[in-house]
Amino acid sequence: MINKKQLLDSMQHEVNIIKHLGDKLHENDLSYRPSEKQRSMLELLQYITVCASGPAINTITGNWDHMESMDADARNVTLQSFS
């Protein structure tokens, strides 16, 4: 059974990996799409900013009221502001 500290440590490790990979991108990489119907790299960075924190807040509060403002904030994420 995983305890709370192990879970938090694992989540922090994942965040560090994502931030590290984000640091490897350049402006000319942001429009890249693996295929036509997949997210661009910029859309992926924007999605990643809310994909875990949104459901985590829902788990605590029991509602999704926060998601509209989080989605709006995510649309403003750039390569410079990602980390």
Image (cartoon, rainbow, N blue to C red):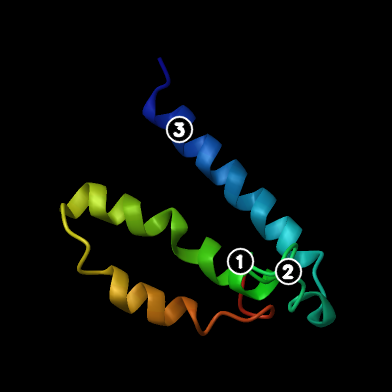
Q: Nearer the viewer, mark 3 or mark 1?
A: 1
Q: Which of these two is toward me, 26 or 4? A: 26
The residue most toward the bottom is: 76
The reply to whether the C-beta atoms of the residues labelled 2 and 1 are less than 8 Å apart is no
Q: Is residue 7 visible?
A: yes
Point out the image quarter for the C terminus: bottom right
Residue wearing tag 1: 44
- Relative to residue 37, is residue 55 depicted above or below? above
Q: Position of residue 47 (x, y in %)?
A: 52, 66
Left/right placement of residue 59 relative to residue 42 reads left
Q: Position of residue 65 (x, y in %)?
A: 20, 68
Residue wearing tag 2: 33
The residue most toward the top is: 1
What type is the residue that disc 1 sits on?
Answer: Leu
Q: Residues within 10 Å of mark 1 (few under 14, many from 20)?
A: some
Mark 2 → mark 1, Cα distance in angstroms: 10 Å
Which residue is depicted at the point 52% across and 36% down? Answer: 9
Q: Earlier in the sequence, mark 2 or mark 1?
A: 2
What type is the residue that disc 2 sits on?
Answer: Arg
- Residue 67's mark? none
- Residue 7's mark? 3
Q: Earlier in the sequence, mark 3 or mark 1?
A: 3
Q: Is residue 83 visible?
A: no
Which residue is depicted at the point 75% across and 57% down? Answer: 21
Q: Position of residue 28 (x, y in %)?
A: 83, 81
